[in-house]
Image: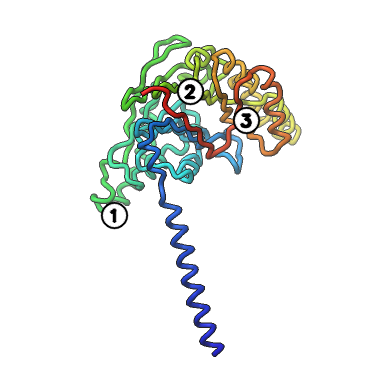
Amino acid sequence: MIRTLALVLSVLALAGCDRIMERQVEKGIERDTALLESPDMTVVLCGTGSPLADPQRAGACTAVIAGGQLVMVDAGPGSWETLDLTKVPTSKLSAVLLTHFHSDHIGDLGEAMTQSWIAGRDKPLDVYGPVGTKQVVDGFVGAYAQDADYRTLHHDEQHMPRAAAPAVAHEIPLADAPDADAVVFDRNGLKVTMFRVKHDPVKPAVGYRFDYKGNVVVVSGDTAKSDSVVEHAKGADILIHEALDRDMMSRVAAIVSSHGNPRLGKMANDTLGYHTSPVEAAEVARDAGVKTLVLGHLVPGPRNFIMRRMFLAGVDGVFTGTVVLGEDGQRFTLPPKQG
């Protein structure tokens, strides 16, 4: 009797484990495909961190879904996994837009390229950016070429077509002027415009403006306070702007130097001049008449209530609109204002 009961319990336990496992697999593969059919414009933060290691934040990345397209702006380290976990339809990744070529903005480009192919992308991935993009893209394609060969050999051409594996670079030339811009593409109602920003000595460095059904979303990229961002974010519904807290980073630099690493201390201090403070980002949002300011690429990433208060100190005295301290996985939805 005891043995029979134990056997029954074992069978029930196994059945329960099977159902749990089944549900976990289901959750892993389910995708929010309705996003592609929706008339809304959806923005997903897939990376709000910086080069500073942060267990809660991936490297810089913003995804925009509109007009049946999924577009990533930058692909910082860890950002692909963050995006994948938000359940967006990653097989439909249609473009990656690069703002510049710092490692914390391009580190996951190979994963975006390969994992979207594994998910079902059936043609080469378009990667847009300023002059220099081809060198970056060609490097990732070369680095992942053997991996792509193995996968096609293993799973066959029908399931993993080799021709769809790589990315193709599209360099967008910009005039040599601080406020220069150029249309990247305009399809299915989604218009994307690239514009110069100020991230000296990093040149070129750009931001992007998205126009769709009357809504405007702007991603600043890495930049010091820039009139170009103000100009291109005029009346934007959402401005996603980088932010560096100079007081906190100055303290970081001093502490690192006092602990025997003046080299890293100097490098931390060097970052102060080519980023935007939270208050300066608020000034940009105010001057542009932005409705919502989302602070991303947070340096350093606030990890608790006190750091968040410090990071936002003075912002509400400058900008009266909505301010959001960005978090990985956050989603914003903009219903259409026009047909």
Tell me residue 54's x, y (percent): 61, 40
Distance from disc 1 to disc 3, alpha carbons, whole Å, reads 42 Å
Residue depicted at x 71% and y 25%: 313
Task: Write the residue at 68% across / 33% down.
Answer: 308
Which image quadrant is residue 259 in?
top right
Q: Is mark 3 on a helix, strand or loop?
A: strand
Which percent across, then down, holds residue 239? 52, 23
Look at the image and tell me in which quarter the N terminus lies.
bottom right
Residue pointed to by mark 2: 218
Q: Position of residue 282 (x, y in %)?
A: 61, 19
In this rendered view, identify the residue nearer to me: 260 or 180: 180
Q: How crowded is mark 1: few (under 14 residues within 10 Å), some or many (20 or more)?
A: few
* Front: mark 1 or 2: 2
> Which amino acid is tagged 3?
Val
| Circle nearer the N terminus (1, 3) | 1
Work out whether residue 80 or residue 202 is closer to the camera in this orientation and state it. Answer: 80
Q: Mark 1 points at which residue?
A: 155
User: Hey, what amino acid is under mark 2?
Assistant: Val
| Classed neighbour count for the residue bearing mark 3: other residues with Cα under 10 Å, few (<14), some (14–19), many (≥20) | many
Q: Separation of disc 1 and disc 2 at Cα?
A: 40 Å
